[in-house]
Amino acid sequence: MNFWQKPVETLLELLQRKAPHLRQVRHFPSQHLHREVDFDVYLPPDYHRFPERRYPLVVFNDGQDLPVMHFSSILERLYYQQEIPHFIAVGVYASSERIHEYGTARQVDYKQRGEKAPQYTSFIINELLPAIERRFRLLEGAEHRAIAGFSLGGLSAIDIAWAHPHLFGTAGVFSGALWWRWSPVHPENPDADRIMHDIIRQSTHWHQGQRFWFQCGTLDEEDDRNGNGVIDSIDDTLDLIRELRMKGCPERDVYYHEMEGGRHEPFTWGEAMPVFLKWSLFREL
């Protein structure tokens, strides 16, 4: 809209815009990872107008994927349509060490990948969260905080949330690498030895009130190791949901979003993002 042609209409449109404020943090030093970390902070559009207001927090692994899926535009649309409450999002960029830093903190996979997952967890818990809490106004309590991720970042997210329910009340897993296993596939028992499934199975209890959101696309992959006609990513996700249910997690606290034709890529995850944000930010749903 041209300001000189329609100044009043243009001004009203600008005042009504709900775009988040992007803060780019670069070269944040991490003692746990022995490297510098980049991350983006997406502040809600009213953040500077209401200095007394505090906000929920959502941390994303693989934060470099958020600009690819036009995350700011997704938030702007949802804010404008009043479909989600205002919140603070933090997208942590993965580095060349991604395959080593993501995974499960309890153990590496059978190829010795994920050996730095304990250090990455320590970075999130002991360095990133305190830094965000010091700099920005957050609501207190795990019920106001979520951690999510894409693919291997999704596995890392649920592993961190499960181990630290006092910090994260919600985990979001987009196309999660839930196949992560401690031994190669056995033809006689192809679904055995999946690490995250075993972590939940061996836990003494489920933390009451913690919630779990999962997304899979029917074109996430083509592998079907057990030959049941269902791709592995969907099988692994549904099996993990069953483990959660057996542990006592009620149906209302688990959400599964399967996308027909969805692929293992940021475009699909961007299409699923509104579903995740609405469910995770409105705890009563």
Image (cartoon, helix red, strand yellow):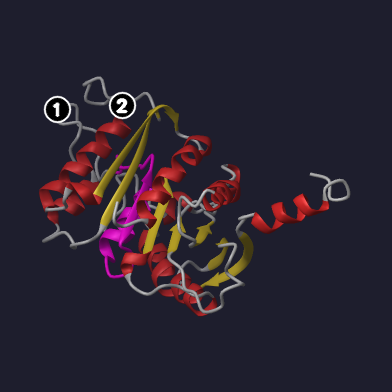
Q: Earlier in the sequence, mark 1 or mark 2?
A: 1
The secondary structure type at the circle numbered 2 is loop
Q: Which residues are magenta?
A: 153-180
Front in this rendered view, residue 271 or 47: 47
Taking the spot 33% from the left edge, 54% from the top edge, the residue there is 171
Task: Choose top left, top right, bottom left or bottom right for residue 233.
Answer: top left
Tell me the CA gap for discs 1 and 2.
18 Å
Q: Which disc is residue 188 wearing?
A: 1
Task: Choose top left, top right, bottom left or bottom right for residue 281.
Answer: bottom left
Looking at the image, is 224 positioned above or below residue 122?
A: above
> 10 Å neighbourhood of mark 2: few (<14), some, or many (≥20)?
some
User: Could you tell me the amino acid type at mark 2?
Assistant: Ile
Residue beneath disc 2 = 231
The secondary structure type at the circle numbered 1 is loop
Task: Choose top left, top right, bottom left or bottom right for residue 110.
Answer: top left
Image coordinates for residue 256, horizontal then vertical, percent:
29, 40
Q: Is residue 219 rendered to the left or right of residue 19?
A: left
Q: Examine the rendering and report whether any part of residue 151 can be seen.
A: no
* Dots 1, 2 in contact, CB < 8 A: no
User: Could you tell me the amino acid type at mark 1?
Assistant: Glu
- Residue 164 lies in magenta, yes or no? yes
Looking at the image, is 194 positioned above or below residue 200?
A: above
Looking at the image, is 176 positioned above or below residue 120?
A: above
